[in-house]
Image (cartoon, rainbow, N blue to C red):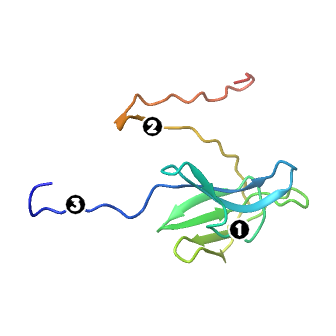
Amino acid sequence: AAAGRRRCRSARRPRMFVFGGRSSDAAFVNSLERYDPSTNEWEEEAVAPMLTARRCVRTAVLNGKLYSAGGQNEADLATFNAVERYDLATKSWEAVAPMATPHEAEARFYPTAAVRRGRPEARPQPRLPQLGRAV
């Protein structure tokens, strides 16, 4: 940097969060796990579990808070309308106003960018499932 100029870098590192789901023994879980690509490690202890165990949950980020909405419960696989908000600063969940209509969602992760040796690569093309065909 030129003399007299300062660089400003964000203290935030990119992270990916995974909400709820089912464990290997088919039990519904309320975990919130965080992946840190800079260390290539998953962290579960660093964040609090959701208030409700669920799968097929919808998620969003708004104003620096994570939202977990709807999903299915374990008792009867019913879809429900509960919404929880996670505060990254306090590492705590709270229930917020429920959705008017229950929802559930299935999620898949498709990469949208790649970097090799600090340089952008051609964007990977995800293979999306075709109806009636195995991927």
Q: Is residue 30 left or right of residue 108?
A: right
Out of 91 and 128, give the one closest to the viewer.
91
Say few, some or many: other residues with alpha carbon within 10 Å of mark 2 (under 14 / 14 to 19 / 20 or more). few
Q: Position of residue 2 (x, y in %)?
A: 10, 55
Q: Which mark is residue 7?
A: 3
Q: Residue at x 56, y 77 (%)?
A: 90
Helix, strand or loop at mark 2: loop
Say few, some or many: other residues with alpha carbon within 10 Å of mark 1 (under 14 / 14 to 19 / 20 or more). many
Out of 61 and 10, give the one closest to the viewer.
10
Q: Is residue 63 left or right of residue 75?
A: left
Q: Position of residue 95 (x, y in %)?
A: 68, 76
Say few, some or many: other residues with alpha carbon within 10 Å of mark 3 (under 14 / 14 to 19 / 20 or more). few
Residue type, mark 3 in image:
Arg
Count of marks overlaid on the render: 3
Up-down: is 123 above or below 79?
Answer: above
Q: Say whether disc 1 or disc 2 marks the residue closer to the N-terminus.
A: 1
- Residue identified by numbered label 1: 50
Residues tagged 1 and 2 counted as in contact (Cβ below 8 A):
no
- The answer to whether residue 89 is visible is yes
Report which quarter residue 58 is drawn in.
Answer: bottom right
Residue type, mark 1 in image:
Met
Residue projecting furthest to the right: 76
Q: Residue at x 73, y 22 (%)?
A: 133
- The answer to whether residue 96 is visible is no
- Residue identified by numbered label 2: 113
| CA distance for labels 1 and 2 | 30 Å
Q: Position of residue 29 (x, y in %)?
A: 78, 59
